[in-house]
Image (spheres, rainbow, N blue to C red):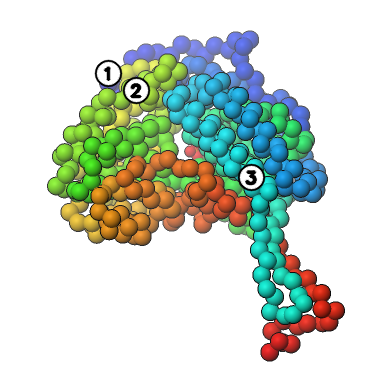
Amino acid sequence: MTMIATPTTTPEPLVITEQTFLGQNFIAGEWQVADTTFDNMSPNHTNKLVGRFPNSTAKDVDAAVRAAVDAYPAWKKTPAPERAKVLYRLALILEGMKEDMAREMTLEMGKSLEEARGDIQEAIDMAYYVAAEGRRLFGQTTPSELPNKWAMTLRQPVGVCGLITPWNFPIAVPSWKLLPCILAGNTVVFKPAEDAPLMGQRFVEAFDQAGLPKGVLNLVQGIGNQAGKALVEHKDVRLISFTGSSETGAQVAKTCGEQLKRVALEMGGKNACIVMEDADIALAAKGLAWGAFGTSGQRCTATSRLLVQSSVKDALLDKLLEHTHALDVGDTNEGAAIGPLVNQAQLDKVLRYIEIGKNEGARLRCGGERVNREGFFVSPTIFDNVTPSMRIAQEEIFGPVLSVIEFDTFEEAIEIANGVEYGLSSAIFTNSMSQAFRAINELEAGITYVNAPSIGAEVHLPFGGVKKTGNGHREAAETALDIFTEWKTVYIDYSGELQRAQIDNY
Ligand code: ADP
């Protein structure tokens, strides 16, 4: 593979053909074109248009919110096991669409076909898992402190929810939000990322086929600071669930705070993987290559810091470099395992961080350059001799860049791992039970993997992070219902008397 700083090929001018895909919004059960559109380009080829999608305005958002408001009373009243039937049908429909959708996902946002299939499988798993909640959705019954009095809790929907999602898991992440939200009886306005609108449309088409009543799910495509912003600001939206960058998340939270609107945020990470000297070094190297460079490092759980005990650093790095050199970087539409960054801005950001790393005095061990081909490719990059305070050890890069930091003791490793603003995922490779359990307890992160890389969430376990990664919520699992439902507490006094709690019984 030849590397140079800038591409030598001049992209062909953009060609719009009759086959150009024209995306639509979905409002009140109708597919609708918008007045203006934006272009969605394939990251493997800078001149290849995936389609044109509605550049929705506040007016479109308002129409979608009104449709969701109108659909809410009937959907809320529909028994949860009935609502769940739509999700079972959705799972079957997604299974049928999986292969075609995976190819489109690879074209649209560049991840490998194998990973794209996994992305859709996650939504299928989630659909089955959440559908089963339709016959659970448990509340509690508990004794009252007074005789002949019944006490219980039940879950109720929140209302109209705005769901805003990123491009890196364009089906999986929307499924974490859409499925529990709809199952719980809410109605939705969904704003997918502008770098993955086709996947947003496909997901909504699947819901439409599954027989979801009109207005329960509305799709509004568009640009974040126009369509997304209008959705967050809309007075009739009771809840915003957002996954994306910390900068945008902070703005979303500010608006929601001003309006006293419920908000669930899932944002950045700077995930560390600790490798102790007693670890299986071959396994750790393999895991690190996958954790750091899968999806070209564009996962919020990607391993971006390797903390390695000094005594095994050279042995581990030798093996990791071998794996990294063997990675097949190229056009994922043609089967490459490691694809491009999603867009020009992301490419510029990653190249900027590589320069920062060099200027900070870190040692470049491999990669560090744009790949000499069309598209937004950066070769998998490893920096050695990184110190914990360097910017490449502190800030989220969201690309194929791994910063290697050495340590001597376990305590030092934990301190370095915790010495960042984020706290999403973490990992430790060790064969010591005591070190593994201490890491589970001491790592400040929502997720800890032992003897596995920092990626690989399963749908029935909570997903989310501490510190600046989130604001205390957990997606997936049963915990997703805590985002999308309100608790109702019920007291039923069948004594026929006025009974006063804390007074008549003391
Ligand atoms: P990234 O930089 O990874 O694309 P963003 O936070 O910019 O992350 O985008 C995540 C999602 O948030 C996208 O759907 C985007 O359109 C949306 N978004 C961006 N800016 C805003 C905003 N000001 N208000 C609401 N949504 C936004």
Q: Is residue 343 above or below residue 476?
A: above
Residue at 21% across, 33% down: 319
Single out the mark in the foreground, 2 or 3.
Answer: 3
Q: Secondary structure at mark 3?
A: helix
CA gap between label 2 and label 3 equals: 40 Å
The answer to whether residue 362 is left or right of residue 71 is left
- Disc number for residue 132: 3
Mark 2 = which residue? Answer: 329
User: Quick one: label 3, few (<14), some, or many (20+) residues within 10 Å?
Assistant: some
Q: Amino acid at mark 2?
A: Val
**Quadrant housing the N terminus:** top left
Residues at discs 2 and 3 in contact (Cβ within 8 Å): no
User: Which one is nearer the viewer's eye here, 244 or 281?
Assistant: 281
Q: Locate residue 332: give its quadrant.
A: top left
Residue at 26% across, 49% down: 430
* Label whose residue precedes the other's in the sequence (2 or 1): 1
Residues at discs 2 and 1 in contact (Cβ within 8 Å): yes
Q: Quadrant of ligand 1?
A: top right
Q: Is residue 347 visible?
A: yes
Residue at 52% across, 43% down: 459
Q: Is residue 342 visible?
A: no
Mark 1 = which residue? Answer: 1
Disc 3 residue lies near ligand 1 with CB under 8 A: no
Residue at 48% across, 31% down: 118
Q: Amino acid at mark 3?
A: Ala
Q: Is residue 436 above or below residue 288?
A: below
The answer to whether residue 492 is left or right of residue 274 is right
Q: Residue furthest bottom?
A: 506
Q: Position of residue 338 (x, y in %)?
A: 37, 26
